[in-house]
Image (cartoon, rainbow, N blue to C red):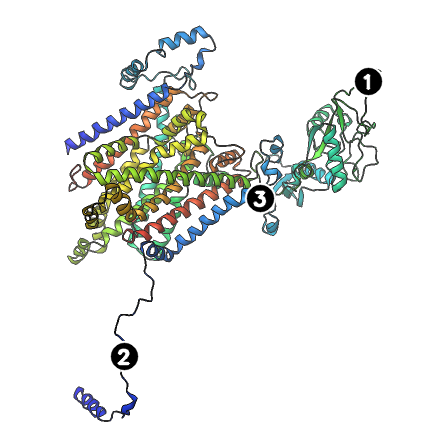
Amino acid sequence: MANNTFNKKIADMDNLPVIAKEKFQFAQRDGAIHDTKLETKPIGYFKDAMSRFKKNKSSVVAAFIILFLVIYSIVVPIAFANNYNTSLGDNLFLEYGKLLPKAEAFLWAGWDGCKNVELGANDYNIRRAIGVETGLSPIVTAEKFTTVDETNGKTYTKYRVKLDTYYDLGMYIIVVNKENYKAIMSWQDEHQIQVIFPAVDYKAQDSTNAQRLTERTANIWYKCNDKGVPTLDQEGNFQNIYKISNGSDNYSSLRLESDPGTWSYAAITGAADMDENGNIIYDADGFPEGGVSYKLRVCKYTYFQYIYGIEPSFVFGTNSVGQDIFYRLAQGAQFSFMLAVSVSAINLTIGAIYGAIEGYFGGAADMLMERIRDVLGGIPFTVLTTLFQLHFADKVGVVGALLFAFVATGWLGMAGTVRMQFYRFKNQEYILSARTLGAKDSRIMFKHILPNALGTIVTSCVLVIPGVIFSESSLTYLGIINLESSRWTSVGTMLALGRDYLSNYPHIILFPALFISMLEISFNLFGNGLRDAFNPSLRGSEG
Amino acid sequence: MVKYIFKRIAFALLTFLIIVSLCFVLIKLLPITDAAQFGQDASVIETRRKLLGYYDPLPKQYVTFLTKTLFGGDWGVGEQIYRTKDVWEIFVEKLPPTMLLNVYSMVFAVPLGLAFGIYAALKKNKWQDHFISTSVMIIVSVPSYVYAFLVQYFLCYKLGWFPFLMKEGTDYLSWDMFVSVVPAVLSLSFGTIAGLTRYTRAELTEVLTSDFMLLARTKGLTKAQATTRHALKNAMVPIFPMIVGEFIGIISGSMIIESIFGVPGVGGLYIKSITGNQGNPDYNFFMLLSSFYTLIGLLSGIVIDLSYGFIDPRIRMGER
């Protein structure tokens, strides 16, 4: 068989196609023979690492998440600053605490600041009264149902209500001076939004207990029983108990639609200035001069609009002290990033120098410096932070003391890494040749060895960052350090503020917790990706 | 070996002494806070200061501290918190809850961590392994307090299975107590399980690919036999010290978990000693707890190193 095909091939050779001689030409008659230049670009150490890093998809995603979080922390405090979230330390803030997240763009997804609750008939009516008075009804939808109490066999009417937490804020009493009173009135006229609501004549309540209750609770503007439950008339309407004006409130602005024009909108306290005849001195607008102040019932929602010029709406809601979580979290994140990056940079500098000296010189110097490192490494971090806070917080501030604490023992790890790298490289031939050529120690250390160790160093630098952020958030959560100020906060503090409200207002904790979890996960993924890229031999070995 | 152990212990004690001395000096440099129980009476405060040697030169105070406190065991009485109570006694009282919590969490976490790690290593590069490795990566990164919030919100509040806080009282082994520490134990365990899984998987995959495993299979062992008798034993060499280290760490506990679940433990005591009474830290408690944390840290380092030699006699500690 094989012989057959061979013979056949021989036969084919005889029948080769004939090509004319002039069709042949020399490949290189005149051209010089030389190597062609390489078309591809040379790949250096970092480029090689970069190409390896790009293949690691999860790390790339992590890098983008980190980028996103960094941008969030930088952009939000600048772009989303408004009158509300920049005016911290205002007592008014507490009135707007614990509002649920509300985003205009995601109202359809249930991100609307509402919560579903079951209310008894009384609670339901109190909520309804807010809506009737202000026109901003906290009850979005309501569904009536009856339940039977197992213990006593009674039937109760209850409501499944979708409650808007923003409108549920209701009323509150403020005491303002003449100028503010005028300002609110003119703002009302300009925007046609009712801020001031009629004063209530609490003496109009039938029982003394109800009177006391009405005096304390700004939301009650109707006849009610001792528990604040509205007493309805025959048609099921609330019966108002508004005070009739005697003209002293000087109110000349928007009135409620149902107002016959006689209701009083402000209660007056304090003494007016008198002239020598005992007559009250009035200013040009007819307001009494002097220490007269006006006690107003204002709707929290519209009063917010008046004070801050925006409608209350918080993407992440507000926490227990009324801070806008979206904005405050960005501030906390900014602080965390800045702290972590500066700690990482300082650690790198100190650690690199210390580790380089240790690793390069070896011997007794190494021995001694290692023991120093051992001793410092034995100090528990919490103890160290506490001592630094006690000593330096007064002198360099809380942040400075915290930074010192992080740096004081933080460089130990970096020094260890650099030391190992120096041990690895210092006996290689190229170092020997550099030394033979007369290079100084410092030049060999920082010009010849350190660049080779850079990959490992960069990786451990990145891996320091999540550790710092975690420690910082733990310490602030525990209250060992307190970073809270108008400019800074910490994710840990934000978590601590939400701790007591975990069951009813989980959103206060949710967003900071989500933020820190995302940050830690992506930094670890990113760091591991970097390590694999720089040291392919270490791939797969975790930790 | 014995020489090495002594060397390590001697050096650890020296380190301990240096750190505690540093702490002592740093605390003494702070302004004096007087014990709150003696009120505002200047003469009483003055007498007490003299009696306790506040006006002695620092070296003399240091010697007193060494002889009376550090080696004598008299850590004084609570001045801002637990006033007039013996500091050491309060500390000993706080140990059991912390240890209880951590023992439960270790008992729960170690077998699970090992099991997941072994499973992932055996199924290397299959979907089970990818699933476990990815979850581990995520779980390891998320801080423990986030688990604490999740556990508290879902298990304690939504489902109502467990109480929010640890039960009060000293009946540490009762069933009620066990139920009340479950949330804290769970929150502590997530991280440990994930860490152990990751470590076990890494070590075991390395051992499974080594030559002696091939030999074991060639001489006729089944895969199960080879894995349990040869691979696991070898993989345990680095894993076991890690577990031992965690066990030492159980006494020091987790401050943040203790504070979230209201565990009356050492971590809570430490925080109390810092925040103290109206911002005045209690230095007596602080000194004792700082020394305690330092000692535990150093001790676990030694035990981890020594356990290498213990579990695998081929490893001679202290030799180069």
Instruction: Give the spatial CA distance, label 1 vs label 2.
Output: 119 Å
A56 shown above or below B91: below
- In the image, A118: left or right of A224? left
- In the image, A407: left or right of A431? right
* Residue drawn at the location 34% of the way across and 56% of the way down: A47
* Residue B145 seen in render: no
According to the picture, the residue beneath numbered tag 2 turns out to be: A30
According to the picture, the residue beneath numbered tag 1 turns out to be: A275
Q: Position of residue A183 (x, y in %)?
A: 73, 34
- In the image, A323: left or right of A180? left
Q: Nearer the viewer, mark 1 or mark 2?
A: 2
According to the picture, the residue beneath numbered tag 3 turns out to be: A80
Give amino acid for label 3: Phe
Name the chain under label 1: A
Counting other residues with Cα less than 10 Å from the Cα at mark 1, is it few (<14), some (14-19), or many (20 or more)? few
The quadrant holding residue A376 is: top left
Q: Are marks 3 and 1 on the same chain?
A: yes
Q: Earlier in the sequence, mark 3 or mark 1?
A: 3
The quadrant holding residue A127 is: top right
Q: Nearer the viewer, mark 3 or mark 1?
A: 1
Q: Position of residue B194 (x, y in %)?
A: 35, 45
Name the chain under label 2: A
Instruction: Give the spatial CA distance, label 2 vs label 3.
Output: 72 Å
Name the chain under label 3: A
Q: A500 or A355, which lies in front?
A: A355
B38 shown above or below A341: above
Give amino acid for label 1: Asp
Question: Helix, strand, or loop for circle 2?
Answer: loop
Q: Position of residue A218 (x, y in %)?
A: 70, 31
Q: Which quadrant is home to the N terminus of chain B?
A: top left
